[in-house]
Image: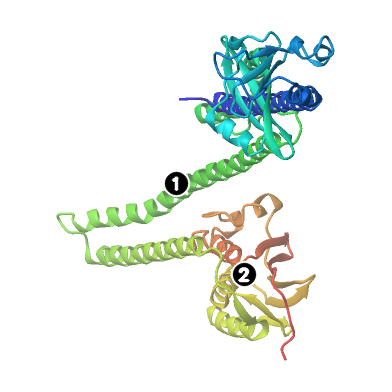
Amino acid sequence: MMSIRFKFTLLYSAILALTLAAFGVALYSIQSQNTWEAIKRDQVRTGEGLEEFVHMIMTSPYPYGMGAEGSAWPKSFMFFSTDIIYTQLPEWELIRILNAEGHLLASPYGRIEDALPISPDGLRAVKENQEWWESITVKGQRVLLYCRPVLSGGELVSILQVGRPLTERDRSLRTLSETLILVSLITLVLASGIGWVFSGFAFRPIRRLTETAKAIGEERDFTRRVAYTGPQDEVGRLATTFNEMLARLQDAYQRVAVALEQQRLFMVDVSHELRTPLTTLRGNLDLLRRDPPIPSTDRADILADMSDESDRLVRLVNELLLLARADVRRNLAQESVALRPLLEETCRQARFLDPQRSILLDSEEIIFQTNRDALKQTLLIVLDNALKHSSGDVSVTGRPAGGRVEIRIRDSGEGIPPAQLEHIFDRFYRAANSAANPGFGLGLAIAKSLVEGQGGTISMESELGKGSEIILSFPAQTAAPG
């Protein structure tokens, strides 16, 4: 499989090759066209300069109309003039004079073999008083032939031919093309090598990303990070994003590890809580199955004990189910709730838990967003906990506080030591002074899960000898009822 580095270098080289090819073709075409046009301009200037000489031939006493093969024609230019004409003839151009029918009349040396061919199309164009260019081959050389009509009184009387060998031009163009190809190949090889080296530097952080990811996968070490000190370009942002992702993975991994540890401890606690009533039930069943049977009075006590333990098991299972539901119901649906009526209803129901105790309510009229059922269940759990662990009155207050809604439930119990207070919301945790009260240590854990599911927080403040206070806080918008 090709690496990204190789693909990048290959793409870069292909683009460079296409660019060089386009540049070479354009340069070659421009040079070819420019030299071609320059030769044609030179031929036109030569033709214009020789028209006077051609008119002199046409006005000579000799019969210029004869030019057919076997006649005394062609003549040399010396036949018409001495050295004047030669001063006007470039040595690299071929000059010929034809009659109107295309037969040779004059050349520098007056030889019939000096005739330059003219195509039927060219002869026809000249007879129509048009200039004509065509490429011919003379003695193995390419020649650009320019045919110019010479007129007298508007009639074609002669044809002037100016030929220019293209050997030097072709050689120059061939040298140019070879040079362009050679330079392009050398440039392409050097650029590809330099591109390969620089792409290695550019992709080094990506290689580090790969190595780091591989090491993390093998070692499960989410504390590792990619070391990158370059500019914050695309690669730099990739390294930064990768490190941020690792930080989030590390946090998630730690939270999962903590959750798994809590789950393990939870299962240990559940097993411990279930073992006692199950062991009691099993022991009592063995007693009931004894032969001879135990006395009827003992049998009645055993059945009563088994009934109590069965009820305890049912309560434990119900609280575990309630806790499981609270854990699942995170991000509970929100609705507008009037705080004071909800607190009045909850306090009225909680008074049935201990009719001899007073629950004092002091709440403002507040409407805020929360889940009514979950909040009521939380309040009942907290009030039940306060009634169980205190002997005096319980007070409930509801107030807005800094854009939040706070509900405080205060009891007048013995209070909780600071060392135990930080574990008060842990599952199956029971303070040392609560051993005499029935329960499994799941109530406040359920309350905490329900409050967090509403987007709120729960905390406890306690002072030994003075009592404890639980604070529920919700980040909801508040408004006075209309």
Front in this rendered view, residue 276 or 284: 276
Numbered badge on residue 386: 2
Q: Position of residue 267 (x, y in %)?
A: 43, 48
- Residue 121 figure quarter: top right
Which quarter shows the C terminus? bottom right
* Number of numbered callouts drawn: 2
Front in this rendered view, residue 142 or 197: 142
Residue at the image point whose x is 72% and y is 72% from the top: 406
Per the image, label 2 sits on a secondary structure element best described as helix
Numbered badge on residue 6: none
Q: Position of residue 19 (x, y in %)?
A: 65, 28
Answer left or right for 367 relative to 313. Answer: right
Per the image, label 1 sits on a secondary structure element best described as helix
Q: Is residue 193 above or below residue 250?
A: above
Q: Position of residue 151 (x, y in %)?
A: 72, 34
- Residue 179 figure quarter: top right
Residue at the image point whose x is 57% and y is 60% from the top: 434
* Residue 42 seen in this snapshot: no
Q: Residue furthest front?
A: 61
Residue at the image point whose x is 72% and y is 36% from the top: 233
Q: Residues within 10 Å of mark 1 (few under 14, many from 20)?
A: few
Q: Is residue 214 above or below residue 330?
A: above
Residue hosting label 1: 268
Front in this rendered view, residue 182 or 337: 182
Q: Which colour scheme appears in the figure? A: rainbow
Marks 2 and 1, the one that precedes in the sequence: 1
Look at label 1 and name its amino acid.
Val
Front in this rendered view, residue 454 or 196: 196
Look at label 2 and name its amino acid.
Ala
Q: Nearer the viewer, mark 2 or mark 1?
A: 1
